[in-house]
Image (tube, rainbow, N blue to C red):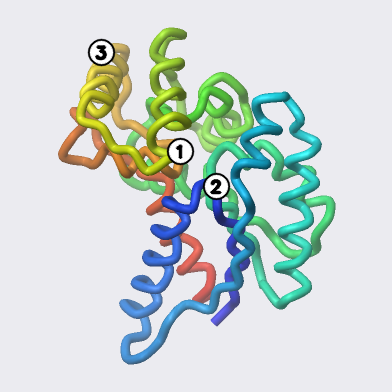
Amino acid sequence: MKTVGLIGGMSWESTITYYEILNKEIVSALGGFHSAKILMNSVDFAELEANMSNGNWDGNAAILADAAKRLECAGADFIVIATNTMHKLVPQIEREIHIPILHIADAAATSVIRDGFTKVALLGTKFTMTQDFIKDRLKGAGLEVIVPDAPDIEIVNNVIFNELCLGKVLDASRAEYQRIIESLKERGAECVILGCTEIGMLISAEDSVLPVYDTTIIHAKEAARQSLG
């Protein structure tokens, strides 16, 4: 079994889900008393959030590259970054390490394509929805990507940072997300990618008029598969 190098804490709520899924997948595959081999570096999200707010992405790249290097030195075989938004920094992190990073968008694209969908709605932080670091990976896999309009982008982003990252799950926000997903379906989306590792706290398959692809679950399961070779 390979050792997963998990960079967590962004936020710690979703990192719990990664840890749980990794172990459940290993137990399901191997049985008995088996559990996942995981090394985790859990960062202080307040530092990264402050850098994001100030546009200091180089500062975040330094923090995460340091975390990845520490995991590599400790014996990790590959890196899993337990958040979508920080995949913006994958190129900078990759330059500092010699082990691969399992990209969250690649795992999501594989899952969507396997089910026969070609046009996806993408929800996530404002950075994920308006910038190209996730969208281009999805498009490169052959998917068409649509995102909410500008006012709804703000709603989705505010719920993530002001509620979900603080452990708040509100019915009113769920209703807003459901409305937004319905509007994306009307624009032709065949499924919705939850491109933020916290959104699964709020939206499940039962809450959506579109098939749901939760990147947290997909990414963690793929990490377990990679661990088993």
Q: Secondary structure at mark 2?
A: loop
Query: Which image quarter: residue 8?
Result: bottom right
From the image, state whether disc 3 or disc 1 is nearer to you: 1
Measured along the vertical axis of the image, is residue 206 above or below residue 2? Answer: above
Q: Amino acid at mark 1?
A: Cys
Disc 1 or 2, which lies upstream in sequence?
2
Measured along the vertical axis of the image, is residue 176 above or below residue 170? Answer: above
Q: Residue at x 70, y 68 (%)?
A: 71
Q: Residue at x 39, y 27 (%)?
A: 159
Question: Mark 2 highlights which residue?
Answer: 10
Question: Mark 3 highlights which residue?
Answer: 186
Question: Mark 1 highlights which residue?
Answer: 196
Q: Amino acid at mark 3?
A: Glu
The residue most toward the right is 96
Q: Which corner quadrant holds the N terminus?
A: bottom right
Query: Which image quarter: residue 148?
Result: top left
Q: Secondary structure at mark 1?
A: loop
Q: Work out how far the residue at label 1 is from the one at label 2, CA to CA, in angstroms.
A: 10 Å
Q: Amino acid at mark 2?
A: Met
Disc 3 or 1, which lies upstream in sequence?
3
